[in-house]
Amino acid sequence: MATLKVAEVKRKLNCISVFMQIRWREDLPVGIVVERKGANIMVASVESGSMAAQNIFPGDVLVDVNGREVNNNVSAAKKAIRQSIIEKKNVVLKLERDITPLKMISTPAVDVLAILKRQRGFWKRRSKFEPIEEEGPGKPKRVYHVPNVESEPLPVDDTGKKLVATPSRDGGTRAEEPVETAEEEPATEEEEF
């Protein structure tokens, strides 16, 4: 059973209205802290791990509770939420969220703009190609096998040397014989400065 359900989303020019139905459970807090900011009631913070943690964000404006507007009265909004939870075990909140329009960071290159202009609305056009799965009118095309096709071998290294196994990077494996190393020169006591 879902504890929080986004019931409806309405988009305006720079704002999204989100209707959320919260079904209260005793083991989970609702998890929002609201406060008055100017003429609005805003979500000040959201508890992590609460019901509201994934869908309600700080800065969201609380517009109404169960269809009743909350006009700048934080205590009335809190009381309406608590009362609804006590009576019905759920509450419907309408929140508004400001969204900033996306800005173009840089203009695309001229060739990219030409491709975009030429392909404008490509997803609306019907494809010129027919799908393979569908059978078209007429008989299927036959594919013929041609037995006498000439082939040309690729040039290779004809030195005749055997391939040498490349040793592993960690110094070899246990199956390999130990590598004989040159005798090290004894260290001299003289050091140059």
Image (cartoon, rainbow, N blue to C red):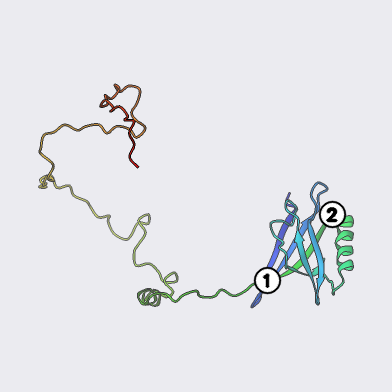
Disc 1 crowd, CA 10 A, few/some/many (<14, 14-19, 20+): few
Q: Can residue 146 be seen in this snapshot?
A: yes
Judged left or right of residue 142, residue 42 is right
Q: Point out residue 182 in the picture as x, y percentages from the top left corner.
A: 25, 27
Position of residue 157 relative to residue 130, above or below, is above
Task: Tell me whether the residue at label 2 lies in contact with that at label 1, contact meaning CB atoms closer than 8 angstroms.
Answer: no
Q: Which residue is mark 2?
A: 89
Residue in the image at 78% along x and 69% along y: 42
Residue in the image at 77% along x and 65% along y: 43
For residue 167, the mark is none
Residue in the image at 35% along x and 42% along y: 193
Q: Point out residue 167 in the picture as x, y percentages from the top left corner.
A: 29, 32
Q: Can residue 67 be seen in this snapshot?
A: no
Q: Point out residue 63 in the picture as x, y percentages from the top left corner.
A: 78, 71
Judged left or right of residue 164, residue 34 is right
Camera-side residue: 131 or 81?
Answer: 81
Camera-side residue: 96 or 132?
Answer: 96
Q: Amino acid at mark 1?
A: Lys
Residue in the image at 27% along x and 34% along y: 166
Judged left or right of residue 121, residue 51 is right
Position of residue 144 relative to residue 131, above or below, is above
Label 2 to label 1, Cα distance in Å?
A: 25 Å
Label 2 vs 1, first from the N-terminus: 1
| Numbered disc 2: secondary structure | loop
Q: Amino acid at mark 2?
A: Lys
Camera-side residue: 24 or 121?
Answer: 24
Q: Which residue is mark 1?
A: 10
